[in-house]
Image: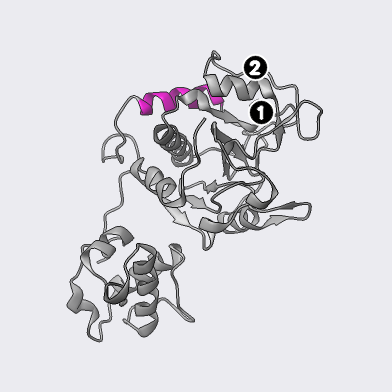
Amino acid sequence: MATPLPADRLLAALRAEGVTVVEHPGWRSHNRNHTGAWGPVTGVMIHHTVSSGTRSTVEMCFNGYEGLPGPLCHGVIAKDGTVHLVANGRANHAGGGDPSVLQAVITETYADRPPAPREHQGSDGAVDGNSRFYGFECINLGNGTDPWPTAQLDAIERVSAALCRAHGWGAKSVIGHLEWSDWKSDPKGFGMPTLRQRVQTRLAKAAAKPTPGSGKPAAPRLQPFPGTSFFRKETSSPVITAMGRRLVAEGCAAYTVGPGPRWSEADRLSYAKWQRKLGFRGSDADGIPGAASWSALKVPYTK
C-alpha cells in the first residue's frame, strides 16, 4: 500500500516511462475526494470504455454521465497510444469488488490470476476499489472484435509499469476490472496475465523511452529552441503554430482564435500560463520562451 502520487509526480512517472501524455484542462484538481477516501493505493486497474472516438471519450470520462458523475478514471488511453489525464484523486472507475482480490494484489502472492471475484458494487462483502486503485480507461468497443493496436497495448504496458515503478510494486499490482468484480468483463480482447508478463519484463529494465529499431514507437523529433530573439519580433513561422498546439494540449491556451503562425499577444499570454505551470514566477513568467520551458513543452519538429 502507498500514498497516492501528487499530480506532478504522476506526470513525471508516466513521461519517464516514455508515455505520450496530454493533460486535459483541470485534471490536477478534478476528483471525487469529497465522497470518500483516496488512498492508500494498492494497484492499477485497466478498463475498456465501450466507446469510440478520442475527443468524445475523454470528455465522457472527465464529466461522467447521468447516474455516474466524473471523473470516471485517471487517464484515457487512446488507440494511438496517447494517454489523456482527466483526474488526480478519487475517481468513479472501480466500484465495489472482492476483498480477497484486494488482499492478493496487496501481497502479490497469486499465480497468473488473482482469485476469482465473488463480489460487486452493492454486494454485502464488497470493498471500495475507488479508494485503492488508479484507473485507466482504454478506448475500445469491448465486443471482443474491436482491435487493440500495438501502440495502445504498448501504452497500457508503460502506464502500468510507470505506476508500479513509482510505488515499488510488481506487475501483480495490475489487474483488470473483470478480475475485481464478478459483474464486469473488461478489458475484453487481450489477456491480463500476458499484460502482467510484459509489465514485469519492463520493470526488470531501467525506465527508458523507446528508440528507433527497438520495435517500439520512436520518440518524436522535437523542435530545437529557436532563441529568445525569435519571439521578440513579428515572427511568422509554423514553429509558432506547433508551439501553440502544444500549449493548448497542456491546458495553457489563452486563444480566442488560433493558434496560428504569427507570434501574437495570445501566444505570449498562453506561454506565460505554461511558465507559471512549471513554477516560474515574476519576470521569469513573462510569456517569452526560454530554453528550459521550451524543452519541457516538447514542441514537435516542423520544417
Of residue 51 and residue 159, the one placed in the foreground of this image is 159
Judge whether 272 appears above or below 44 on screen. Answer: below
At mark 1, the secondary structure is loop
* Numbered label attached to residue 180: 1
Mark 2 / mark 1, whichever is N-terminal:
2
Q: Which residues are magenta?
A: 191-203
**For residue 169, side relative to residue 89 (left or right):** left
Q: Magenta stretch containing residue 113, yes or no? A: no
Q: Residue at x 20, y 77 (%)?
A: 230
Residue pictured at 52% horizontal, 63% vertical: 25
For residue 36, which numbered disc appears in the image?
none
State the SS at label 2: loop
Query: Residue tagged by mark 2?
Result: 115
Q: Is residue 138 left or right of residue 184?
A: left
Q: Disc 1 marks which amino acid?
A: Trp
How far across and how far down the image is residue 69, in percent?
A: 71, 54
Q: Residues within 10 Å of mark 2 (few under 14, many from 20)?
A: some
Image x and y of residue 42, in percent: 54, 31
Q: Are marks 2 and 1 in contact (CB under 8 Å)?
A: no
Separation of marks 2 and 1 at Cα, in angstroms:
9 Å
Give the overall secondary structure of the magenta segment: helix
**Residue at (48, 41) in percent of width and height:** 152
